[in-house]
Image (tube, rainbow, N blue to C red):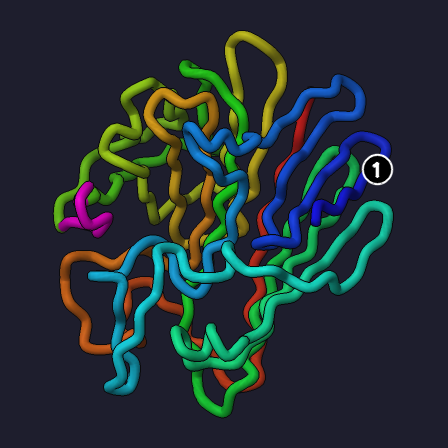
Protein backbone atom coordinates (compact mmCIF):
# COMPACT_ATOMS: atom_id res chain seq x y z
CA UNK A 1 0.00 0.00 0.00
CA UNK A 2 1.20 3.50 -0.85
CA UNK A 3 0.91 6.15 1.87
CA UNK A 4 1.34 9.88 1.28
CA UNK A 5 2.45 12.77 3.47
CA UNK A 6 2.66 16.44 2.57
CA UNK A 7 3.30 19.96 3.75
CA UNK A 8 3.18 23.40 2.12
CA UNK A 9 6.06 22.64 -0.26
CA UNK A 10 6.37 18.88 -0.82
CA UNK A 11 4.36 15.71 -1.22
CA UNK A 12 6.04 12.37 -0.52
CA UNK A 13 4.91 8.77 -0.92
CA UNK A 14 6.07 5.63 0.89
CA UNK A 15 5.29 2.01 0.04
CA UNK A 16 4.85 -0.34 3.00
CA UNK A 17 6.45 -3.03 0.80
CA UNK A 18 10.07 -2.55 1.76
CA UNK A 19 9.25 0.74 3.51
CA UNK A 20 10.44 2.25 0.23
CA UNK A 21 10.22 5.94 -0.49
CA UNK A 22 8.26 6.08 -3.75
CA UNK A 23 8.07 9.77 -4.59
CA UNK A 24 9.02 13.30 -3.57
CA UNK A 25 7.19 15.94 -5.58
CA UNK A 26 7.31 19.73 -5.52
CA UNK A 27 3.82 21.11 -4.93
CA UNK A 28 4.83 24.38 -6.59
CA UNK A 29 6.14 23.00 -9.88
CA UNK A 30 4.88 19.39 -9.94
CA UNK A 31 8.42 18.16 -10.54
CA UNK A 32 9.14 14.62 -9.28
CA UNK A 33 12.61 14.42 -7.73
CA UNK A 34 12.68 10.68 -7.12
CA UNK A 35 13.36 8.09 -9.82
CA UNK A 36 10.11 6.26 -10.53
CA UNK A 37 11.40 2.71 -10.89
CA UNK A 38 11.25 1.87 -14.59
CA UNK A 39 11.56 -1.97 -14.57
CA UNK A 40 13.26 -1.86 -17.98
CA UNK A 41 16.14 0.07 -16.37
CA UNK A 42 16.06 -0.31 -12.57
CA UNK A 43 12.84 -1.17 -10.74
CA UNK A 44 13.98 0.27 -7.40
CA UNK A 45 13.35 3.76 -6.12
CA UNK A 46 14.84 3.94 -2.63
CA UNK A 47 15.39 0.47 -1.13
CA UNK A 48 16.49 -0.04 2.47
CA UNK A 49 19.57 -2.24 2.87
CA UNK A 50 19.50 -4.41 6.02
CA UNK A 51 21.10 -6.42 7.60
CA UNK A 52 23.82 -6.29 4.92
CA UNK A 53 24.92 -3.80 2.29
CA UNK A 54 25.83 -5.19 -1.11
CA UNK A 55 26.76 -8.81 -1.66
CA UNK A 56 28.36 -11.52 0.46
CA UNK A 57 30.84 -14.04 -0.90
CA UNK A 58 28.59 -16.70 -2.50
CA UNK A 59 25.65 -15.00 -0.69
CA UNK A 60 26.69 -16.75 2.54
CA UNK A 61 28.24 -15.89 5.90
CA UNK A 62 29.25 -17.71 9.06
CA UNK A 63 28.29 -16.62 12.56
CA UNK A 64 29.39 -18.52 15.66
CA UNK A 65 30.24 -21.53 13.51
CA UNK A 66 26.87 -21.69 11.73
CA UNK A 67 26.47 -20.88 8.03
CA UNK A 68 23.60 -18.71 6.81
CA UNK A 69 22.41 -17.57 3.38
CA UNK A 70 21.59 -13.93 2.69
CA UNK A 71 20.57 -12.25 -0.59
CA UNK A 72 22.20 -9.10 -1.93
CA UNK A 73 21.34 -6.04 0.21
CA UNK A 74 19.53 -8.22 2.77
CA UNK A 75 15.84 -8.94 3.21
CA UNK A 76 14.26 -5.73 4.53
CA UNK A 77 13.64 -4.26 1.07
CA UNK A 78 11.50 -7.27 0.04
CA UNK A 79 9.30 -7.49 3.14
CA UNK A 80 5.98 -5.96 4.18
CA UNK A 81 6.41 -3.42 6.98
CA UNK A 82 3.85 -2.38 9.58
CA UNK A 83 2.55 1.17 9.84
CA UNK A 84 3.61 2.55 13.22
CA UNK A 85 2.31 6.12 13.19
CA UNK A 86 1.12 8.73 10.73
CA UNK A 87 0.44 12.46 10.67
CA UNK A 88 -0.07 14.88 7.80
CA UNK A 89 3.67 15.47 7.32
CA UNK A 90 5.16 12.37 9.02
CA UNK A 91 4.93 8.61 8.72
CA UNK A 92 6.74 5.78 10.50
CA UNK A 93 7.01 2.04 9.82
CA UNK A 94 8.46 -0.90 11.73
CA UNK A 95 9.95 -4.25 10.72
CA UNK A 96 10.66 -6.98 13.26
CA UNK A 97 12.11 -10.47 13.05
CA UNK A 98 10.01 -13.34 11.69
CA UNK A 99 10.53 -17.08 11.52
CA UNK A 100 11.89 -16.60 8.01
CA UNK A 101 14.36 -13.84 8.94
CA UNK A 102 15.61 -15.89 11.91
CA UNK A 103 16.58 -18.66 9.50
CA UNK A 104 18.72 -16.19 7.56
CA UNK A 105 19.79 -13.86 10.38
CA UNK A 106 19.58 -15.25 13.94
CA UNK A 107 18.79 -12.01 15.75
CA UNK A 108 15.63 -10.45 17.14
CA UNK A 109 15.37 -6.79 16.16
CA UNK A 110 13.14 -3.83 15.52
CA UNK A 111 13.94 -1.63 12.53
CA UNK A 112 11.99 1.64 12.55
CA UNK A 113 12.05 4.17 9.72
CA UNK A 114 10.45 7.60 10.01
CA UNK A 115 9.88 10.05 7.16
CA UNK A 116 9.27 13.71 8.08
CA UNK A 117 8.73 16.68 5.78
CA UNK A 118 10.34 19.83 7.20
CA UNK A 119 9.85 22.84 4.94
CA UNK A 120 11.54 21.95 1.64
CA UNK A 121 13.40 19.00 3.18
CA UNK A 122 12.70 15.34 3.77
CA UNK A 123 14.32 13.81 6.86
CA UNK A 124 14.54 10.01 6.98
CA UNK A 125 15.55 8.50 10.33
CA UNK A 126 16.46 4.82 10.77
CA UNK A 127 16.53 3.14 14.17
CA UNK A 128 17.81 -0.38 14.86
CA UNK A 129 16.94 -1.96 18.23
CA UNK A 130 18.85 -5.01 19.50
CA UNK A 131 16.32 -7.26 21.30
CA UNK A 132 18.88 -9.99 22.06
CA UNK A 133 21.03 -10.87 25.05
CA UNK A 134 24.16 -10.76 22.89
CA UNK A 135 25.84 -8.24 20.62
CA UNK A 136 24.03 -7.94 17.28
CA UNK A 137 26.11 -7.52 14.14
CA UNK A 138 24.62 -5.76 11.13
CA UNK A 139 25.15 -3.35 8.27
CA UNK A 140 22.69 -0.70 7.14
CA UNK A 141 22.36 1.42 4.02
CA UNK A 142 20.00 3.79 2.26
CA UNK A 143 19.69 3.79 -1.55
CA UNK A 144 17.55 6.72 -2.80
CA UNK A 145 17.62 7.39 -6.55
CA UNK A 146 17.10 10.93 -7.83
CA UNK A 147 16.12 11.98 -11.33
CA UNK A 148 18.94 13.67 -13.22
CA UNK A 149 20.51 13.92 -16.66
CA UNK A 150 23.87 13.03 -18.12
CA UNK A 151 26.14 15.99 -17.47
CA UNK A 152 24.61 16.85 -14.08
CA UNK A 153 27.02 17.18 -11.18
CA UNK A 154 27.49 15.98 -7.61
CA UNK A 155 29.17 18.76 -5.66
CA UNK A 156 30.73 18.18 -2.21
CA UNK A 157 30.85 20.91 0.44
CA UNK A 158 34.64 21.08 0.37
CA UNK A 159 37.52 19.77 -1.74
CA UNK A 160 37.93 16.00 -1.43
CA UNK A 161 40.69 13.58 -2.34
CA UNK A 162 38.95 10.23 -2.76
CA UNK A 163 39.51 6.84 -4.32
CA UNK A 164 36.76 4.38 -5.18
CA UNK A 165 36.80 0.68 -4.46
CA UNK A 166 37.03 -1.45 -7.60
CA UNK A 167 34.30 -4.08 -8.08
CA UNK A 168 34.44 -7.60 -9.48
CA UNK A 169 31.58 -7.34 -11.98
CA UNK A 170 30.82 -11.08 -11.87
CA UNK A 171 30.62 -11.58 -8.10
CA UNK A 172 29.87 -7.95 -7.03
CA UNK A 173 32.74 -8.09 -4.53
CA UNK A 174 35.30 -5.43 -3.69
CA UNK A 175 38.75 -5.98 -5.18
CA UNK A 176 42.07 -4.92 -3.62
CA UNK A 177 42.58 -2.27 -6.32
CA UNK A 178 41.14 1.25 -6.06
CA UNK A 179 41.02 4.12 -8.54
CA UNK A 180 41.04 7.93 -8.08
CA UNK A 181 37.76 9.89 -8.20
CA UNK A 182 38.68 13.31 -6.83
CA UNK A 183 42.03 15.00 -6.27
CA UNK A 184 41.45 18.02 -4.02
CA UNK A 185 38.25 18.67 -6.00
CA UNK A 186 34.58 19.15 -5.19
CA UNK A 187 32.73 17.92 -8.28
CA UNK A 188 31.90 14.56 -9.86
CA UNK A 189 30.22 14.90 -13.26
CA UNK A 190 27.71 12.21 -14.19
CA UNK A 191 28.71 10.82 -17.58
CA UNK A 192 27.16 7.98 -19.57
CA UNK A 193 30.17 5.78 -18.76
CA UNK A 194 30.89 6.65 -15.13
CA UNK A 195 29.12 3.55 -13.77
CA UNK A 196 30.37 1.07 -16.36
CA UNK A 197 32.41 -0.60 -13.62
CA UNK A 198 29.49 -0.53 -11.13
CA UNK A 199 29.08 1.86 -8.19
CA UNK A 200 31.59 4.33 -6.87
CA UNK A 201 32.27 3.26 -3.27
CA UNK A 202 33.89 6.09 -1.33
CA UNK A 203 35.02 6.50 2.27
CA UNK A 204 37.01 9.08 4.21
CA UNK A 205 34.71 11.87 3.01
CA UNK A 206 35.19 15.17 4.85
CA UNK A 207 32.03 16.89 3.62
CA UNK A 208 28.67 16.56 5.36
CA UNK A 209 26.67 17.27 2.21
CA UNK A 210 26.72 16.52 -1.50
CA UNK A 211 24.51 18.52 -3.88
CA UNK A 212 22.98 17.24 -7.10
CA UNK A 213 22.93 20.20 -9.51
CA UNK A 214 22.70 20.97 -13.21
CA UNK A 215 23.93 23.65 -15.60
CA UNK A 216 20.61 23.50 -17.48
CA UNK A 217 18.18 24.40 -14.65
CA UNK A 218 18.10 25.68 -11.06
CA UNK A 219 16.72 22.56 -9.33
CA UNK A 220 19.01 21.02 -6.72
CA UNK A 221 18.98 18.23 -4.16
CA UNK A 222 21.26 19.02 -1.22
CA UNK A 223 21.89 15.70 0.47
CA UNK A 224 23.03 15.37 4.09
CA UNK A 225 24.87 12.04 4.31
CA UNK A 226 24.41 11.81 8.09
CA UNK A 227 28.07 11.13 8.83
CA UNK A 228 28.00 7.72 7.13
CA UNK A 229 31.44 6.10 6.82
CA UNK A 230 30.79 4.97 3.23
CA UNK A 231 29.02 6.60 0.31
CA UNK A 232 27.82 4.63 -2.69
CA UNK A 233 27.07 6.52 -5.92
CA UNK A 234 25.41 4.45 -8.63
CA UNK A 235 23.08 4.18 -11.58
CA UNK A 236 22.66 1.89 -14.53
CA UNK A 237 25.08 3.27 -17.14
CA UNK A 238 23.49 6.12 -19.08
CA UNK A 239 20.24 6.05 -17.08
CA UNK A 240 18.53 9.36 -16.10
CA UNK A 241 18.94 9.02 -12.34
CA UNK A 242 21.66 8.75 -9.71
CA UNK A 243 21.57 6.97 -6.36
CA UNK A 244 23.21 8.75 -3.43
CA UNK A 245 23.69 6.01 -0.86
CA UNK A 246 24.91 6.58 2.71
CA UNK A 247 26.17 3.25 4.02
CA UNK A 248 27.00 2.01 7.50
CA UNK A 249 28.65 -1.09 6.11
CA UNK A 250 29.95 -2.28 2.77
CA UNK A 251 29.80 -5.31 0.47
CA UNK A 252 32.29 -8.12 1.00
CA UNK A 253 35.76 -8.02 -0.45
CA UNK A 254 37.32 -11.10 -2.01
CA UNK A 255 39.08 -11.77 1.33
CA UNK A 256 37.33 -14.59 3.19
CA UNK A 257 36.43 -13.77 6.81
CA UNK A 258 36.02 -16.41 9.51
CA UNK A 259 32.95 -14.84 11.10
CA UNK A 260 30.27 -12.24 10.34
CA UNK A 261 31.60 -10.18 13.24
CA UNK A 262 34.81 -9.66 11.21
CA UNK A 263 33.03 -8.28 8.14
CA UNK A 264 34.39 -4.97 6.86
CA UNK A 265 32.40 -2.00 8.18
CA UNK A 266 30.19 -4.17 10.43
CA UNK A 267 28.28 -2.53 13.29
CA UNK A 268 28.30 -4.17 16.74
CA UNK A 269 25.20 -3.19 18.74
CA UNK A 270 25.20 -4.20 22.43
CA UNK A 271 22.13 -5.91 23.96
CA UNK A 272 19.05 -3.70 24.39
CA UNK A 273 20.80 -0.73 22.78
CA UNK A 274 19.77 1.41 19.81
CA UNK A 275 21.55 2.48 16.63
CA UNK A 276 20.25 5.57 14.80
CA UNK A 277 21.22 7.18 11.53
CA UNK A 278 19.49 9.55 9.15
CA UNK A 279 19.72 11.32 5.84
CA UNK A 280 18.15 14.60 4.84
CA UNK A 281 17.42 15.83 1.34
CA UNK A 282 16.66 19.51 0.76
CA UNK A 283 14.87 20.17 -2.54
CA UNK A 284 15.16 23.48 -4.36
CA UNK A 285 12.99 24.47 -7.34
Q: Secondary structure at mark 1?
A: loop
Relative depth, front residue between 112 and 208: 112
Asked whether 282 falls inside the magenta stretch, the response is: no
- 91 to the left or right of 177: right
Specify the segment rendered in magenta: 168-175
* Vertical comparison of 140 with 259: above or below: above
- 250 to the left or right of 246: left
The residue sitting at 78% across, 51% down in the picture is 90
The residue sitting at 29% across, 81% down in the picture is 63
* Vertical comparison of 105 with 179: above or below: below
- 213 to the left or right of 104: right
Question: For mark 1, what is the residue?
Answer: 7
Image quadrant containing the C terminus: top right
Q: Where is residue 115? Give x, y as percent.
A: 70, 50
Q: Where is residue 66? Give x, y as percent.
A: 27, 84
Give the residue at the far bottom of this rendering. 133
Amino acid sequence: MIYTIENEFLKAAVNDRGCELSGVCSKQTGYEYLWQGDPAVWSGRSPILFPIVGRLIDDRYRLNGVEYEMPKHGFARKMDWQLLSREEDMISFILSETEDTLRRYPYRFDLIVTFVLEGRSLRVTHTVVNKNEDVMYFSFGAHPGFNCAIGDKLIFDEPETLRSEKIDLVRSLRLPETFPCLNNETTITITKDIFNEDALILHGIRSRHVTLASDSHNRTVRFDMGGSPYLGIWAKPGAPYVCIEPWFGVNDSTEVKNDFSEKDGINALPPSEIFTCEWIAEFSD
